[in-house]
Image: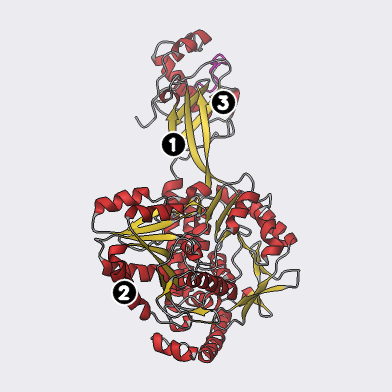
Amino acid sequence: MNLLQLGGAQSTCPWNIAQICEQSRTSARAGRSSITSTSQEIMENDVFKYYSEGEWKVSSSGKSVQVINPTTRKTQYKVQACTQEEVNQVMESSRMAQKSWAKTPLWKRAEMLHKAGAILKDHKKPIAECLVKEIAKPATDALTEVVRSGDFVSYCAEEGVRILGKGEFLVSDSFPGNDRTKYCLTSKVPLGVVLAIPPFNYPVNLAVSKIAPALIAGNSLVLKPPTQGAVAALHMVHCFHMAGFPKGLISCVTGKGSEIGDFLTMHPGINCISFTGGDTGISISKKAGMIPLQMELGGKDACIVLDDADLDLAASCIVKGGFSYSGQRCTAVKVVLVVESVADALVKKVNEKVEKLSVGAPEDDCDITPVVTEFSSNFIEALVMDAKQKGATLCQEYRREGNLIWPLLLDNVRSDMRIAWEEPFGPVLPVIRINSVEEGIRHCNHSNFGLQGCVFTKDINRAIQISDAMEIGTVQINSAPARGPDHFPFQGLKDSGIGSQGSIFVWECCVFYAGLIVEKRMMIMVFDAGFSLCFHVGLSVEKKMVIMLPIQSSPFWIFRKPSLRWHVLMEADISGTIFATDFLNEGRGGSVTLNYFWVWQEMGKLKDGKFSRDVIEAMSENPDFVTSQS
Ligand code: G3H
């Protein structure tokens, strides 16, 4: 039978390869002019430049990498094939830029990110056009991805200001066997240079999900976009460039994984890697060494449907969850585990909805569009053929043209079929009929993945019990798996990854918790003056100043500071046991001296205008901690 006729019969968006190629060429021309007008500087001789040291550059390799349009299967764009030497330069400028960025006030970092987020949203159209061409993302979804990304950048800036502005204060006597002899202050400090590697399916959104938290936390960022999606990512980086971030703070290198992939991930200049993609992440984690990693490596998200479920709701969520962006989402529903008693009814409802999915070009905003590469198409096809050969029921005829695969539900799938376990990343969805909920949970937990899953039932108690039993990062009750909203935590277990994304929980891979332990052999003063004496011990805390001064052999005082008075006792002899002379040399230390003097005078402990070691030691038995606010 003629595939083209079949395409017309099934879809509301008829597929015609000749027509679609022509549409793509026309849109490509339109896309090119739009790209040219928005950011001429990022392209030369038809090849997009890479971004390093705040400049758009042509690689010395003289080579480029082709970005193939999944729809036309022809070259759509070309990007630079960067060399290892160019990666080295990027690393060095990132390292340098990070040093001063870490000292840039948090509110200022946030201000720049807000600006970048707004510019990104202003440029949603040309960037979305790239997504349509490079990864065949349906036009509306492509726009949504860019807007969602701009929103995330701003949200992350706001969250960063709040979360990174807070530290912890601990006292030693809460741990058994300790007295209150130590105080610990922790604060969040940047890691250094973060390497971000997003996947093809969200080259903009999953890039900013890594970029924004890293930057607000004071890190610099090196981006290696996927080849499919590289041009959209370069346009996104251009928005950050326009926002005016310091040179070298953000870099974007493109090229062949075989040339610069390992070189980047094993580079000694990298202090953290944030990766989303397939099992390449597992090999990266083995090679990367002793640095923090955040990885999301896909899932086999199970949808468990119980006998009391709202089947219409379940069917809608299964189709949306399984077939959005042609199933090319880590969070797609990838296996339906339905209780036998309602399986026929559910499969019928799902099939009715699958028949209505439009199939065709991303430019036409069809539901099902070509999958990203021919390699992916072949992989998906192999899974379908394996299941078919082993006896699965194909609810629709299997159909493929080029990279376009028609949506397919496979019923009566069994555990011995590859598709029961492997992630197709395409518009094909297996249904396994189960005899009990326990069987469904067992199947879910037997998977090497553990990203998300969902449960459909009207019984909230059962839903929670099942959720507890599913060994996955997130369970959705009566809705399809999904990452967003983007401030929610997003994390997987087992081969699905490590670490978390989402603006509230992402900080573990952006900062480390620096500890500062103060022993009682130091003096602490807390006051509001707001000037810095950090040269003494290298510690300065905004607003509330903490000054620590090791005091020879004396123990620890914290004392009331009545007021700032600036004279009289600059030359007071305080027996040399309390203040180092540096204090007085700074002038402002005079106020401290005076205060100290005042306290002791008030308490009748001053002898001939001098402090004696005896008096000091006696007083130290009874320290008084009072801040100037009191
Ligand atoms: O492909 C992996 C993505 O993290 C899934 O995101 O749920 O927003 O489609 P999504």
Q: Is residue 589 above or below residue 186?
A: above
How crowded pointer 2 is (Cα within 10 Å; few <14, some 14-19, many 20+) is rated as few
Secondary structure mostly seen in the magenta stretch: loop
- Badge 1 marks a residue whose secondary structure is strand
Residue under the image location 48 percent in, 83 percent down? 361
Q: Residue at x 66, y 80 (%)?
A: 46
Q: Secondary structure at mark 3?
A: helix
Mark 2 residue element: helix
On the rendered image, what quadrant is the C terminus found in? top left
Q: Nearer the viewer, residue 341 or 553?
A: 341
Q: For the point 67% across and 67% down, which residue is it?
A: 255
| Residue on which disc 1 sits | 168
Image x and y of residue 105, in percent: 51, 49
Task: Give the image's coloring scheme.
Answer: secondary structure
Q: CA distance from mark 2 to mark 3?
A: 85 Å
Which of these two is toward me, 469 or 285?
Answer: 469
Mark on residue 584? 3
Residue matched to label 2: 348
Amino acid tagged 3:
Leu
Is 60 on the left-hand or right-hand side of 234?
right
Residue type, numbered disc 1: Glu
Structural distance between the alpha carbons of marks 1 and 3: 31 Å
> Magenta part of the protein: which range?
566-577
